[in-house]
Image (cartoon, helix red, strand yellow):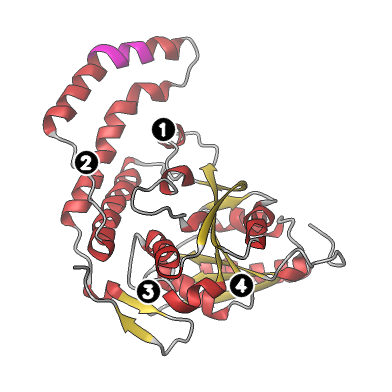
Amino acid sequence: MMALSEPTSDFPRVSVIVPIYNGEQDLPGLLNCLMAQTYPAGQVEYLLVDNASSDRTSQILAAAAEQFAAKGLTFKALSEREIQSAYAARNIGIRQATGELLAFTDADCYPQPDWLTGLIRPFQDDSVGLVAGEITAFPGTTWLERYAERKRTMSQKDTLAHQFCPYGQTANLGIRLKALEKVGLFRPYMTTGGDADICWRVQREDHWKIHYATDAVVQHRHRQTLKDLYAQWYRYGKSNRYLHDLHGVKLAWPLPKKERNRSLLRWAVKELPQAAVKSIAGEPAVGMLTTPLDIYCARARDRGQKEARLPENARDKAYLLALHHAVEQPAS
């Protein structure tokens, strides 16, 4: 940790905001990572928002306040109990923030020690309103975790290359507070896709730039069960539908049945035997399951995209002033 007496002219005030829902398993790791940040302690505050958790999250946050205070760090445990949405929880943090810059991550993430320093540095350019740091895999032990690592699931390189408009995921995203004054905060009733939505509004409605900070690294714990993996890709499909309804972006093409069957046949006849030989030679065995898992994820995404319906109140926008409220008209 940098000494409190170090010059802070190059380190603007930052508010780190983390929404938490039932984070009992991951919170201890996250808290240790936040306490290990190299950003000057006097220039950062940590705002963790409990989104109506039913586990020991509130007790863990209460104990963490003493730990952070002992290290000279500003820590606030906040709560959002009215709306079950990570975006609504983030808005609570934004309204409590005293920093001119906001840094977002999630409870199941592990920011590396220089994460905050790397994420904030690009804001020295006054035209930059958004900074997306990189998201890498937390070293996993299960096949599913290794599969997600191999597929670069959640890499910002993919979202920054989005054909409609680049965006960064809130697992590792910096936002200039001033950039939200005109376009508003996160849509509080959205349950997925809100990171793309706010990044697109900041860029397209107020012409701020987005920067990719490859040295601002957060590790993310990937899904460990098939059920959780399916839910993740189903949510990606829902996000596609919501962003289509809000911004008119193209929907992802469903995976055709013929292509699915052709891929499975090629996997059984060619890819599986080759992967088995490589596994014997010492290469990761997860290669034997790549194609079936690809199809499993694609079907979950397709189903989510097909079944999702944007809730009417998901068009609501929130603003820095809590009483300021507006509803966006449906896209034509």
Mark seen at residue 54 = none
Crowd band around label 2 with a 10 angstrom C-alpha radius: few (<14), some (14–19), many (20+)? many
Mark seen at residue 147 = 1
User: Is residue 86 found left or right of 1 in the rendered image?
Assistant: left
The answer to whether marks 2 and 4 mark residues whose Cβ atoms lie closer than 8 Å is no
Q: Is residue 253 visible?
A: yes
Residue identified by numbered label 3: 188
Residue 196 position by quadrant: bottom left
* Residue sitting at x 63%, y 56%: 122
Badge nearest the viewer, 3 or 1: 3
- Residue 38: x %, y % from top left: 74, 56
Residue identified by numbered label 4: 62
Magenta span = 269-275
Badge nearest the viewer, 2 or 4: 2
- Residue 42: x %, y % from top left: 77, 70
Q: Earlier in the sequence, mark 2 or mark 4?
A: 4
User: Is residue 163 found left or right of 122 in the rendered image?
Assistant: left
Disc 2/disc 4 C-alpha distance (Å): 41 Å
Crowd band around label 3 with a 10 angstrom C-alpha radius: few (<14), some (14–19), many (20+)? many
Q: Earlier in the sequence, mark 3 or mark 1?
A: 1
Q: Earlier in the sequence, mark 1 or mark 2?
A: 1
Residue identified by numbered label 2: 299
